Amino acid sequence: MNWLDAVWIALAAASTTLGLLHLSIWFSRRSGYGHLLFFVLSASIAAIAVFELMMMRSVSPDAYATLLRWVHVPVTTAVLTMVGFVRYYFHAGRSWLAAAVCVIRLLALAVDFSTGTNLNFATVTALAPHTLPGGAGFVVPVGSPNPWWAVAQIDNLLLIIFLLDASATLWRRGEPVARRRALLVGGGLVLCVVCVVGMALLTFVGGLPLPTVVTPAFLAVAASMGYELGADSLRAAQLSRDLYDSEQRSQLAARAAGLVMWSWDAAEDEFWLNDIGWELFGIPRRERPRLAALLDRIHPDDRARAADLIREAVRTGGSFEVEFRVPLPGGATRWITTRGEAERRGSGGALLRAVSSDVTERRRAERETAQQRNELAHLSRVAALGEMAGSLAHEINQPLMAILSNAQAAQRFMASEHPDLGELRAIVGDIVEDDKRAGEVIHRLRALLRKGEVRRDALDVNEIVADVLRLMRNELMNRGVVVRTELAPGLPALLGDRIQLQQVLLNLVMNSCDAMEGVGGSQQLVVRTRVGDGAGIEVSVCDSGRGIPAADLERIFQPFFTTKQHGMGLGLSVCRTIVAAHGGRLWAESAGGRGATLRLSLPSPRMAA
Amino acid sequence: MTVFAVDDDPSVRTGLGRLLRSAGFKAEVFATARAFLGAYRPDVTGCLILDLAMPELDGLELQQQLAERGGALPIIFLTGHGDIPTSVRAMKLGAADFLTKPVDDRALLAAVEQAIHRSNILQQQRREVADIERRLATLTPREREVLEHLLTGKLNKQIAAALGTVEKTIKVHRARVMHKMRAPSLAALVRLTERAGIAAP
């Protein structure tokens, strides 16, 4: 064995080793087609090396011709994979050029097997033996060239054009990686093709005594391509390490913040939940995690809504936010808030990512605050009614008085010899009406005095105004206040607590009355309702009192701020709290020394929609 | 003899009217104090049942106006809540009674009876005073002067000296005064003039 043999065997072995390495990478990933292409290229190069070695040691022209014919098979696969690599892995080069190169190369292969003795020679007549320094002997064929060889030359030209075009594209991308690849494709690959073609021309046409050196050229290309692939693999490994780190960091953050992270692949019904999630939702560890298991844990009253929101987000690829209860063993309830986003994937699939957290404490605090607010509202209501006690007693006394007078009149009429039945009937009718009237007053009072849960009903604001003014009729009269109402008809309903809103209005009217006391002149009060400037309803109570100094316009809403001798200074502050809890606003306006307007705006769900 | 009632509440008004009629009184009801004042004549007898708290002109103001016009109509006040300062004021202005709503018929009718009785007396007195005043009006200025001196308890001689005339002339004047005033004695004359509000200077 001479050194030429040794070098070629080593080249074949190196190529095979590289190829097998990338084949194993491809097997482990299945998606990295770059590695598969590289394996095919390496295998082709190994095959070329083997054919070349045999050609150089051929003993008959026929055997050489046959080997030369068959070496074009691995050369073709090598060219095709090279084109494929540039197209697929670098995403460069024109596809029509790539297609043309492949088709013409296959055409050349067909020509190889159908004309002459092979693609290069019509006939191989003799073999000329040569010896390289170091005693390495090899043969060079002598014969007439195959005219169809031009097909291969055209293909080589196209290949060079394709590669140059691809490298230009890569260069223009400007990134360092793309530029390096441009140099590799434009420099390396083109040089290799030029080398191979030049060698073939010199040997087969020029008859120069050179060994065929396709293998080293191709191997150089393979090595540079392998470098690219290797760099990518290293980068992928780094990325996966980074990803792992980032994953660990986010898990740590989630654990520290008590955040449950979960995701759900709608198409595959694959569900993932982080560690603390099992505990938060109370899902037994042994279960295979499923979205249904999570939904099952939600309180039945909240389940349908949560499921609907999740389904809707998955359907539209949107986000959702929902709060629901999770009953715990032992009767306690946990409040969990969940925020999620769905990402549409492919046809019909979607990936839902969500974060849940325990908000039981916050809920409890909110409930306590609401309860305190409610109690304060109730106390202030009772206080306000207490101030009106005399007038309210009158409201009940009037019908009671009428009833008593009527009933006793009836007794007397009946004691007479010929009682007037018509008169008696009228009396009884009036008694019934007055009794109802007294009942209504008591009913309204009891409603105001009751300490109930805050409700959310659809309310007619004009009705509330009318109710309050009816209840205060006597109070207003005793104070000599003349009330005018300007109630806009057909206002949209608002959502709220009737009693609390009545309380607000009652307080506003009482305040206005107090403001007008002892001012002199006629005491005029105007209550207006109208559609507000924004979305919502506006109610205003306008008095002809002494007005509010500009500095006090905000201060009057502070707790314990009062200008009256009696009174706790809580009325307006409670009013503002109530209005805020209804999503509305309450403020005071006062222009010039005389008169003030208290205005409240409340949102209306119908108008917001 | 009429019982008037003023209350802004129609049911109370109607009920009161019925109760009064059932007890055999002639009742007239009004919605406002102004409406009642429009129909008021000073010579009526009876009584007035008045709600304290009413819009525009309230009970106390009406009472004041009636007192200014003079008349013989005692007022029974009705109130939702018997607040003491108001009732004191009402009584000072001469209220006949002060009742709290809802009022029992016996209490109300008793008060009405009493008020009517008082009204009758008042009316009687009014008539007597008017009669005395009419008699006083028939006196000549000279006779009036003599009357005033008589009321101070002066003798005829002293009066004659004061008026610069003779005792005999005074005697004639005195007889005429006694006759015109229909006073049988000096004591009766003093009583009559006292009732008419003419006191000795």
Image (cartoon, coloured by chain):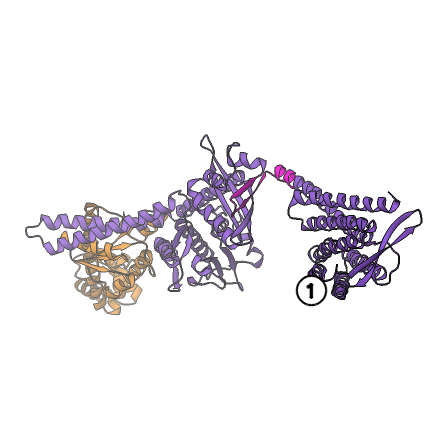
Chain colours: A purple, B orange
Q: Residue A251 colored magenta?
A: yes
Residue depicted at x 80% and y 55%: A61
Q: Secondary structure at mark 1?
A: helix
Q: Farthest residue toward the right?
A: A133
Q: Residue B124 colored magenta?
A: no
Front-lying residue, A104 or A513: A104
Q: Can residue A440 be seen from the camera position used here?
A: yes
Quadrant containing the C terminus of chain A is bottom left
Task: Tell me: A432 left or right of A353.
Answer: left
Q: Which portion, as a residue range, is magenta?
A: A250-273
The residue indicated by pointer 1 is A100
What chain is tagged by disc 1?
A: A
Residue A449: percent from left, percent from top: 38, 44
Residue depicted at x 26% and y 66%: B38
Quadrant containing the N terminus of chain A is top right
Q: Farthest residue toward the left?
A: A417
Residue A325: percent from left, percent from top: 47, 40
